[in-house]
Amino acid sequence: MPSALNSATQADQEAGTTSDAFTSPLRQQSHPSASKAWARSSDTALLQSYNMTSFTDIGVGNYTLTVATNFSGDQWGAVATAASDGIFVGAEGFSVTAVSLKCRDHANNLADTGTTLNTVGDQ
């Protein structure tokens, strides 16, 4: 008869060092490798997302995305890409609840574009 299964705790997942425990889908979210929130947007609206509550178009090439579950601090990461060729996206202005995206063209002018965003960090 197999031995009882050992379920990983949130602390096990956050440490990322336990190798003898199974992980449920809910606990996987606590592991450092798991995406905490992601979004795909047009230049005016959120199109698809996970763990995001809002997309705010602040002005030309300037957007704020708000997460549903707060991060534990402002030291988390985000990778963003532009949907348009020749536009570059920078993630900045991190808080526990949101990140700002600035989209710029080759001449460093703010430019509207759709974006894709992926985040990691401790929540």
Image (spheres, helix red, strand yellow):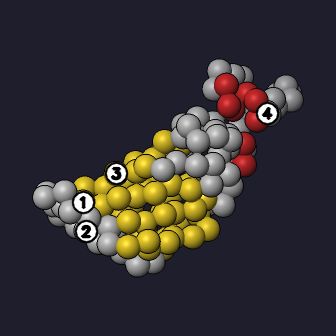
Q: Which residue corresponds to mark 3?
A: 90
Counting from the top left corner in percent of width and height, residue 83 is at: 28, 66
Q: Residue at x 62, y 55 (%)?
A: 97
Asked if disc 1 and disc 2 are in contact, CB closer than 8 Å, the reply is: yes
**Percent from the top left, x then y, of residue 122?**
64, 39
Check disc 4 and report the residue beneath it.
9
- Look at mark 1 in the image and give the residue it sits on: 104
Q: x, y percentage for residue 76?
A: 54, 40
Kind of residue at badge 1 = Arg
Q: CA distance from mark 1 to mark 2?
A: 5 Å
Residue in the image at 76% along x and 35% along y: 10
Q: Is residue 99 above or below residue 19?
A: below
Q: Nearer the viewer, mark 3 or mark 4?
A: 3
Is label 2 in a helix, a strand or a loop?
A: loop
Which is nearer the N-term, disc 3 or disc 4? 4
Count all numbered tags in the image, as a single digit.
4
From the image, state whether disc 4 or disc 1 is nearer to you: 1
- Spatial CA distance of label 3 from label 4 is 35 Å
What number is the disc on residue 111?
2
Pick the front one: 94 or 113: 94
> How crowded is the residue under tag 3: few (<14 C-alpha within 10 Å), some, or many (20+)?
some
* Residue 59 found in image quarter: bottom left
Q: Earlier in the sequence, mark 1 or mark 2?
A: 1
Judged from the image, the secondary structure of the residue bearing numbered disc 1 is: strand
Earlier sequence position, callout 2 versus callout 3: 3
Q: What kind of residue is marked 3?
A: Gly
Q: Secondary structure at mark 3?
A: strand
Task: Report the Cα–Cα distance between label 2 and label 3.
Answer: 12 Å
